[in-house]
Amino acid sequence: METVEMNSVSLKRPRSEDDVANADEIKRQRILEKSKAGNDSGQSIETVTEQPEDMKSEIIPNEESEEQEEEELEDSDEDGDPESFADMMKHGLTESDVGITKFVSSHKGFSGILKERYSDFVVHEIGKDGRVSHLDDFSVPVDDEDPSEETFTVLSDEDKQRLEELQLFKNKETSVAIEVIEDTKEKRTIIHQAVKSLFPGLETKTEDRDGKKYIIAYHAAGKKALANPRKHSWPKSRGSYCHFVLYKENKDTMDAINVLSKFLRVKPNIFSYMGTKDKRAITVQEIAVLRITAQRLAHLNKCLMNFKLGNFSYKNHPLKLGELQGNHFTVVLRNITGTDDQIEQAMHSLREIGFINYYGMQRFGTTAVPTYQIGRAILQNNWNEVMDLILKPRPGAEKGYLVKCREEWAKTKDPAAALKKLPVKRCVEGQLLRGLLKYGMKNIISAFGIIPRNNRLMYIHSYQSYVWNNMVSKRIEEYGLRAVPGDLILKGATAVHIEEGDVDNYTIHDVVMPLPGFDVIYPKHKIGEAYKEMLVADNLDINNMRHKIRDYSLSGAYRKIIIRPQNVNWEVVAYDDPKIPLFTTDLDKLEGKPLPVLPTDGKFRALKMEFSLPPSTYATMAIREVLKMDTSIKNQTQLNTTWLR
């Protein structure tokens, strides 16, 4: 699964215990003075506990719904007292807990603030043809078959609500009658078009009632009509899929698609994309949707904030997950403390050598129960342990309603009682409890199956990642940054061992290591045995990675141990105001916003970095290599938890 996630954090070097005890108003000044003085022990990271108002993602819904209320609950409770958050995060993971222990470069680390603004971290998708996605055109392809603009305004809000309830079978009505106030053939035609285009699955007809004309909306073909947009209403000459560029802030890809599907009143499964993008960033990617016009999509730009859609085109194919070359990142690290020489050494190393291709911390969850532990229990076929790990009380940072749900579960082991404490039912805990309610406590496997497949597989993939990280750290510790006999390299899609006589033909950039599974081979040196020992310690057999439930059988895969980013560029700029943007986004350019004039000798310095990475690599790990710091939330919050604006 492609991952470009990053935590919203600022990266700082550590302070002494005296610094921690100081009043909040002098925390930043003290840490800056210490950093500039050359403090070179481990690193820590400030957590930004409050989103700037101008960067919060919002939508303007037509009406409230249960799902929208759940989203509000999910988004609430995220802020709060930073000191208490730090205290709770003491129970979280550090990098060493998940095998992230090595660096490849020799330069001295330095401090910087990451994601002081969301606009400091921008991701542009790179398509399979190598083209970088940009939002640079709001125009809609001209099509004589498109309905008029009046189609989107002819229905009242009340009409739209009644039609949506009819479309979604939310009431017992079999039809909705809309009175034609100004009765002309043109007006009736527009209402017919509006109902059919805005509410897929509904048909219309005109009726006379008491001397008045009414448009009657009714179901065309039962509930299946909603999932399948009307085929006969789509011109044959037009490609069946509308491709567009989605620009979004502070929403992950699936959340964005759910919002779009709500506004379009269609099922989310008619959308396709090549990769999921991070929530806490500005991201630009291509999306395709089945038989929705560019005109309808463009109209959403008037309703949605922090989403923009553009670069529309019609094609005959959807998009497929994984069909991309990677992502291009533009990252600003503010308030850097490194000397020019340190920065040059760090960036040259990133460009020439690269970074260890570790799975980043977000792969393993943020609470006291790492996702890899649940994955290990699944592979061990220990379903009571799976249930316990997901539902039991856990120390650390969690929303209040989850804490109450866990406490109820621990006290009663009653799924119904625990579920009552949970206003948000779509979370993993809610889904598992619903499954237990449906299938009973003696059928945990079926209850767990209620959780969406991708979420279930995330747990076992997390365990694979945990093993891989640990083994790569051992490999680098044992053999350094050179290819050695017994290492694995890929020839096409096939892994082969490096033989003694061929070792000079390869470099560390050719070496891959396996994620454990039934269809991979292992290195023919000490690390091959280390894989086996690690799995034995976890009560697993490396020679039998097939599971009695097919979904949980691991075939394995190969992953390069060192990634050398492409298109690496950097620049150090001076600035005075921490709130001003240091580069323009696609949306800024479309709206004609100029880049602020920066001083030549400002109070602060920032490092602007650009680089391209292949799919399934973590930008956090590249930035970790540059700054030489621990990216875990636990480490970020222990020594420096208050962000002073």
Image (cartoon, grey):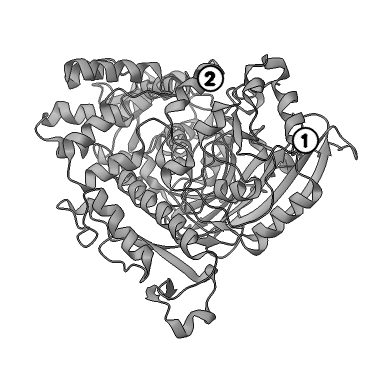
On the image, the x and y values in percent for residue 174 come to 25, 26
Answer with the quarter of the image where residue 472 lies: bottom left
On the image, the x and y values in percent for residue 236 come to 43, 58
Q: Say whether residue 539 is left or right of residue 36.
A: left
Q: Residue at x 43, y 55 (%)?
A: 240
Residue bearing mark 1: 37
Q: CA distance from mark 1 to mark 2?
A: 33 Å
* Residue 557 appears in the figure: yes
Three-letter residue code for mark 2: Asp
The foreground one among 418 and 58 is: 418
On the image, the x and y values in percent for residue 77 come to 47, 18
The foreground one among 188 and 454 is: 454
* Residue at the extreme left of the image, as rendered: 442
Relative to 107, residue 81 above or below: above
Could you say which disc has been placed on residue 428 in the image? none
Could you say which disc has been placed on residue 79 in the image? 2
Answer with the quarter of the image where residue 303 lies: top right
Three-letter residue code for mark 1: Ala
The foreground one among 521 and 414 is: 521
* Residue at the extreme bottom of the image, as rendered: 501
Q: Residue at x 65, y 28 (%)?
A: 15
Q: Earlier in the sequence, mark 1 or mark 2?
A: 1
On the image, the x and y values in percent for residue 144 come to 55, 50
Q: For mark 2, give the secondary structure.
A: loop
Relative to 454, residue 66 above or below: above
The residue carrying pointer 1 sits among few (fewer than 14), some (14 to 19) or many (20 or more) residues within 10 Å by Cα, namely few
Q: Residue at x 69, y 48 (%)?
A: 108
Relative to 535, residue 408 above or below: above
Quarter occupied by the C terminus: top right
Q: For mark 1, give the secondary structure.
A: loop
| In this rendering, the label closer to the viewer, 1 or 2 | 1
Q: Say whether residue 532 is left or right of residue 101.
A: left
